[in-house]
Image (cartoon, rainbow, N blue to C red):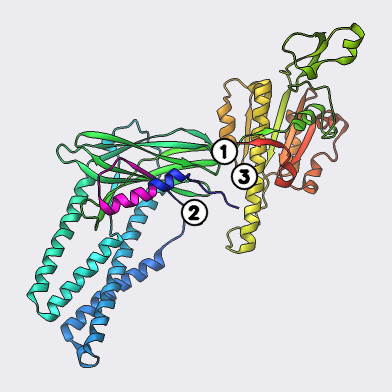
Amino acid sequence: MLYRGKVGGPLLLTEHLMRQLNRTFSLSPVKISLNQRFMSNPHQTFWPKILVSWAAMFLGLGLLLVELMTGFLHYIVPSFVVWTIYLVLLLTSVWGMKTLLERQNRSHLRSAGNGYRKKSNAGRLSQQQSHNIFRLPIEGQIYVVMLAIMLLGALFGKTNTLMLIFALMAGPFIVNGSVTFAMTRKLFLSRKLPRRLMVGEPTSIEITIFNRKRIIPSALVTIEDQIIGPREQLTGKIVFAQVPANSSRKGQYQIRFMQRGRYTLGPARITSRFPLGIVERGRLVELYDEILIHPRIGILAEWWHRRAHEGSEVSRFSKGNAGPHHDEFHRIREYRPGDELRSIHWKTSARRNELMVREYRQIRDQRLLLILDLWQDGKSPEHVNTERNTDKADQQHALIENAVSLVATIGWKHIQECGVQQLDFICFGRDSLEWFGSRRGEQIHAWLDQLAIAEAGDHYSTADIKEEILKHQSASSRTVLVTTRSEEDITPVTNGASSDAVHAYHGLLIVEAAPEKTKDFFQQTF
């Protein structure tokens, strides 16, 4: 199952309010909405539809003009059929023109995304590049059809009244286009957002709009923020009722990212339909930012700590010498008020006739080598859009995300117990990633950043994994290998080990990342 961004109930309510605002044009505070579309193929082309649009527009207008000049149809078909043909030709040309305008706006959007250059919000607002955009909403399309009917009626019926009505209706249409263009002139944007988040963590992105016009305010301005991620495409929308001249306004939209990875925000659309709502004009602003979404981190089950500390050969339900907080046994001492009852050593207490408790100390010097093996068969035909291949791709994606989340949880827990310098991390996938906490200057967010952008691949074999284990493992450290391979595929890692390498494999724990095999690893996820 592919994960998608989710929006809570309040946002759905505000989306309904925003639609009402567009219909009634009543001034109200800023409304917020979020629209999401799954991006199945972001690189698809629209050439067939563009050619059909050009053909529909020229054929519709051309045949209509030829008939108006010759009047051929009046001699062979009844009058009502002629008017029906006129209407069909007119609607065909209007559809072609509308489709071409929409494709032009989308081509601006794609070209801006392909030529992505990261820009800082701290730069000068006047240097923001933009493109003019134009769109006829459904209300505008109906209005254009009514205009065409009035014009045809005036021409064929030779009625001055219809021509006067046509002129009265065409005036507001032209004026509306000019006013909407004036509403979006000299408007600039800035964006404030967090740089790192966790999967499923809700956040707010703040948009500030600046109106640099000296006299004219901007009314009913809509900001649409395009957000492109690894497997999903989102749109954040904010409506500003009014932005006075020489001033600014701030608005926020809430969003929740359900896929780890790097998300690109931008370009942003500034549009307006003020005052009549029959023409939408605006600008496409090339304002870009990035957000890194870290994998989900959960809480490990109690049995995992015992197994991890005692070695891979110990049973899941065995009881080791771990203390209440999975620390190392230190000594037995007298009972003190506040000590946990489960720490009481009853045999010593009975012998000395007083309560004695076990005392533990935290393990701070245990190094962990954490290896993530994101193996994926490169021959799987995921690009073929069939139900079988889609299900296989979904299962593979769930397997990969489960492995990354488990590694993040294990590593984060070890950092909390032993410190950053006691964790080393290696990832095998499309690329090889390394992070060694023992090196000075390494930051914890750099390790999470690597987990956020890690991708699966088939470039590395089990021999490469074995080589890295022998290179970085020591007798005083332990190794946890989380892999997406099956048990049969990962067995060669420990087979054929020489006597010099026995000490390295003694502390190796291999975990298959299949969700059905790791569901008991997590006590709680958030």
* Residue that mark 1 sits on: 452
408 horizontally vs 366: left or right: left
Label of residue 39 in the image: 2
Please tell me whether residue 526 belongs to the stretch shown in magenta: no
Q: Amino acid at mark 2?
A: Met
Of residues 276 and 408, which is closer to you in this image? 276
Q: Using the numbered discs, state the Cα–Cα distance from disc 2 to disc 3 in whole angstroms.
A: 22 Å
On the question of residue 115 being in view, the answer is no
Image position of 108 (left or right of 371): left
Classify mark 2: residues with Cα within 10 Å, few (<14), some (14-19) or many (20+).
some
Residue type for callout 3? Arg
Task: Tell me the quarter of the picture where residue 427 sits.
Answer: top right
Residue tagged by mark 3?
430
Q: Position of residue 210 (x, y in %)?
A: 26, 36
Query: Which span is picked out in magenta?
Result: 15-32
Q: Which mark is residue 484?
A: none
Q: Earlier in the sequence, mark 3 or mark 1?
A: 3
* Secondary structure under the numbered disc 3 in the rendered image: loop
Queried whether the magenta region covers residue 25, the answer comes back as yes
Q: Residue at x 26, y 66 (%)?
A: 142
Nearer the viewer's eye, disc 3 or disc 1?
A: 1
> Horizontally, is 417 left or right of 142 in the view?
right
Secondary structure at numbered mark 1:
helix
